[in-house]
């Protein structure tokens, strides 16, 4: 897939107020400071499309970006930011879960994992929750430019091995870097395959 255009459409805190059309939606989520905005900007070739920040937990809303006038890239708030208040964390959790579970147009959730770290408890719990609720998702390792090629292969392989201790098989896995742009075409091609399927009840392409 080639990205020819990408533009911001709407931000809101309620899944019911998301765009009313029936385009596919591909949502991106991860722990705070996982590099989500940088990855979105890299995928779309728009350096300022998603706002990056050195401050974790900046994204607080559901953000829709229309790509190629064909499908939406959805930037969801990060999770696991401990400095938010308990009420704020609960509110964000309800907003995220409501979007993921109720938004029929959401074709696939791309879960971003910082490839530099060992499996984190809240990531593993979130993955388990996705599985229990039958949510179609992929795992996207980020920031792999900060590791050597050998180290990147080892840490991602070890992470997948940890998941296979409780999963019969893994969801699709992508290895990326917003700096050297690795994994970009693989992600876009996968989105392209899914976008050719009917909206709602999509099955993974062969």
Image: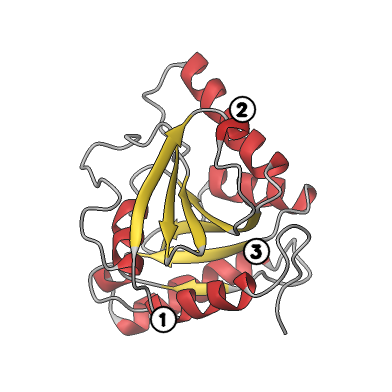
Asked where in the image residue 91 lies, by quadrant, the reply is top right
Cα gap from disc 2 to disc 3, whole angstroms: 25 Å
Q: Which mark is residue 126?
A: none
Q: Nearer the viewer, residue 165 or 122?
A: 122
> Which residue position is annotated with label 1?
185
Residue 183 visible in rendering: no
Residue 126, position as x, y percentages in the image:
62, 46
Cα gap from disc 1 to disc 3, whole angstroms: 25 Å
In the image, 202: left or right of 153? right
Label 1 sits on a secondary structure element that is: helix
Q: Which mark is residue 163?
A: 3
**Which comes before the other along the chain, label 2 or label 1?**
2
129, above or below 26, in the image: above
Asked where in the image residue 193 lies, by quadrant, the reply is bottom right
Residue 9, position as x, y percentages in the image:
40, 45
Residue 53, position as x, y percentages in the image:
22, 42
Taking the spot 45% from the left edge, 81% from the top edge, the residue there is: 1
**Which comes before the other along the chain, label 2 or label 3?**
2
Whether tag 2 and tag 1 are in contact, CB under 8 A, the answer is no
In front of the other: label 1 or label 3? 1
Q: Residues within 10 Å of mark 3 (few under 14, many from 20)?
A: some
> Which residue position is annotated with label 2?
94
Which quadrant, please, contains the C terminus?
bottom right
53, above or below 180, in the image: above
In the image, 105: left or right of 168? left
Q: Nearer the viewer, residue 36 or 40?
A: 40
109, above or below 188, in the image: above
Taking the spot 43% from the left edge, 56% from the top edge, the residue there is: 66
Taking the spot 21% from the left edge, 53% from the top edge, the residue there is: 48
Residue 7, position as x, y percentages in the image:
34, 54
């Amino acid at each position: 897939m080639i990205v020819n255009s990408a533009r911001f459409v709407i931000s809101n805190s309620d899944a019911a107020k998301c765009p009313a059309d029936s385009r596919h939606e591909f949502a991106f989520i991860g722990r705070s400071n996982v590099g989500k905005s940088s990855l979105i900007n890299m995928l779309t070739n728009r350096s300022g499309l998603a706002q990056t920040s050195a401050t974790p937990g900046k994204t607080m809303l559901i953000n829709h970006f229309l790509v190629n006038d064909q499908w939406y890239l959805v930037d969801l708030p990060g999770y696991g930011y401990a400095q938010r208040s308990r009420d704020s964390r609960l509110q964000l959790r309800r907003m995220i879960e409501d979007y993921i579970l109720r938004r029929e147009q959401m074709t696939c959730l791309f879960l971003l994992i910082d490839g530099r770290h060992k499996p984190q408890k809240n990531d593993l719990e979130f993955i388990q929750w996705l599985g229990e609720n039958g949510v179609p998702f992929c795992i996207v390792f980020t920031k792999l430019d900060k590791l050597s090629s050998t180290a990147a292969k080892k840490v991602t392989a070890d992470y997948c091995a940890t998941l296979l201790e409780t999963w019969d098989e893994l969801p699709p896995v992508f290895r990326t870097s917003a700096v050297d742009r690795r994994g970009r075409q693989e992600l876009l091609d996968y989105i392209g395959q899914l976008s050719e399927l009917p909206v709602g009840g999509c099955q993974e392409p062969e």
